[in-house]
Amino acid sequence: MAEFEIRRAKEQDKNQILDLWKYCFSDANDEFNSYYFSQRFKPEHTVVLFREKNLEAALQLNPYNLVIGDVVCEVNYVVGVTVQPESRGRGYMSELIGYTLNEQYRNGEDFSILMPIDTKIYTRYGYANCFFKHEFLVDTQMLESKKSACRLERMNVANSENLEKELHNLNKIYYEVVAENHSYISRNTRSWKNKFAEYKLDGAEFFLVYEGKEVTGYVVFTVPKTPDGIAHVLEMGFGNREAYYAIVGLLRSHATQFKRARIATPQFEEFEILNSFNNQMEHRVLPFMMGRVINAEKVLDMILYKKSFFCCEEEEAGCECSQQLAIEIRDEIIKENNLITICDGRRVIKTIRLEEGADLSELPERRITMTVSELAQLYMKAVSLRKLHRTGKVQIKNATIECFENLFGNRVRPSFINEYI
């Protein structure tokens, strides 16, 4: 028998997986564990490593829809990465993640996401920081406040008589407030119900903002147990300033319960504008989620398609961007991602797998080389090509950087992911 076996979990593995989860995530209480393993856990979404009959390591792949530049992509969100304490340092996690990434490639997936406890753990597997969280630490009485014509209603999922309609209206305003982001999680009625269950575990309160019969905003926050504590506004969205002022009024009305709040919102620019860029408010931008390219060829195809094969107005004048270019990708785990894509100003000419015996005799002189980590950051528009080149993360040969910026773009755009499991 092999030293270990890696496979998808079975229902009879659940108790061992739960025991390992409890050990590794000792800060999770029994109520959360009960919710997660009864409502969210699925054996078929779990990859396990067994040595003989003993579970040594596990991870879970929770499915989400991620919007990337107006295209909805099915992705798996890696959670619950766990290893038995006595088995750490034996390479089991590397084996498990390597197996999982290659299985995802074989399953036709393009991209993967995870929220790391330590980014250094996952950079070795080709993950890169791609999603950032904007957070404000404020004295609530400093928030710009005006009387609002909007009204607030607390949302009670268990007792709501019009739940489906409320969730539909909530989802509508959610899409309005995240639409300017390059990437964000696509939500629906089911995912909102999951979020409400998670918010309930945190003791959070959820309010909808109404302007007449229309939902124009929402806010979810936790009230600290002591007045000197900090409230956590887990998420807030507003369709206009009237909705924003209604939310601020709600937060300020809790002055006897909290005076400071930590606020997360996808609308960080509007938030600062409405508060006149108050420099007494602490604005932090935190690396939050990592992404990983699973299929480099398909990701490159998507980038090329969106750029209309990066043809430019100067093509007829002999611009170097219209001539043949080579894009070389490297991946230490998924061997199929080691490739060179050859393009001209209008189309992909061919893709060459960098395997033994590959014919590399007629490659274009103009070439860019990067790993799947940099490709993920460019795909998510988390970092500009120019800065990756300046810091030595990508190499360009026999071409100007502007030539490849026509392909990958030169704008960094915001993203919004606020899912935790």
Image (cartoon, rainbow, N blue to C red):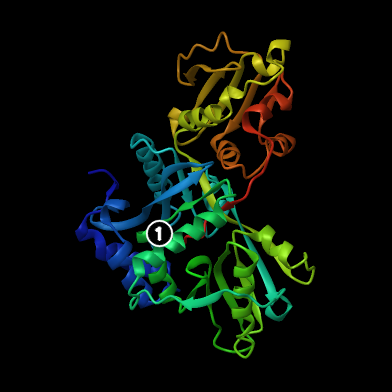
Quarter of the image for residue 217 reads bottom right
Residue toward you, 343 or 82 = 343
Residue at 33% across / 37% down in the picture? 107
> Does residue 236 appear left or right of residue 63 in this picture?
right
Residue toward you, 196 or 299 = 196
Q: Where is 17 relative to 401, above or below?
A: below
Q: Where is 352 relative to 296, above or below?
A: above
Q: Amino acid at mark 1?
A: Thr
Farthest left residue?
12
Q: Is residue 47 visible?
A: no
> Does residue 136 appear left or right of residue 82 in this picture?
right
Residue toward you, 354 or 42 = 42
Residue at 61% across / 42% down in the picture? 381
Q: Is residue 113 visible?
A: yes
Quarter of the image for residue 383 reads top right
Q: Which residue is mark 1?
A: 82
Number of callouts: 1
Which quadrant: the N terminus?
top left
Q: Position of residue 385 (x, y in %)?
A: 68, 35
Q: Where is 187 relative to 159, above or below?
A: above
Residue toward you, 374 or 234 = 234
Q: Position of residue 211 (x, y in %)?
A: 54, 69
Q: Residues within 10 Å of mark 1 (few under 14, many from 20)?
A: many
Report helix, strand or loop for mark 1.
strand
Farthest top residue?
362
Farthest right residue?
279
Q: Position of residue 12 (x, y in %)?
A: 19, 60
Residue at 72% across / 39% down in the picture? 387
Which quadrant: the C terminus?
bottom left
Residue at 59% across / 74% down in the picture? 247
Q: Position of residue 70 (x, y in %)?
A: 51, 42
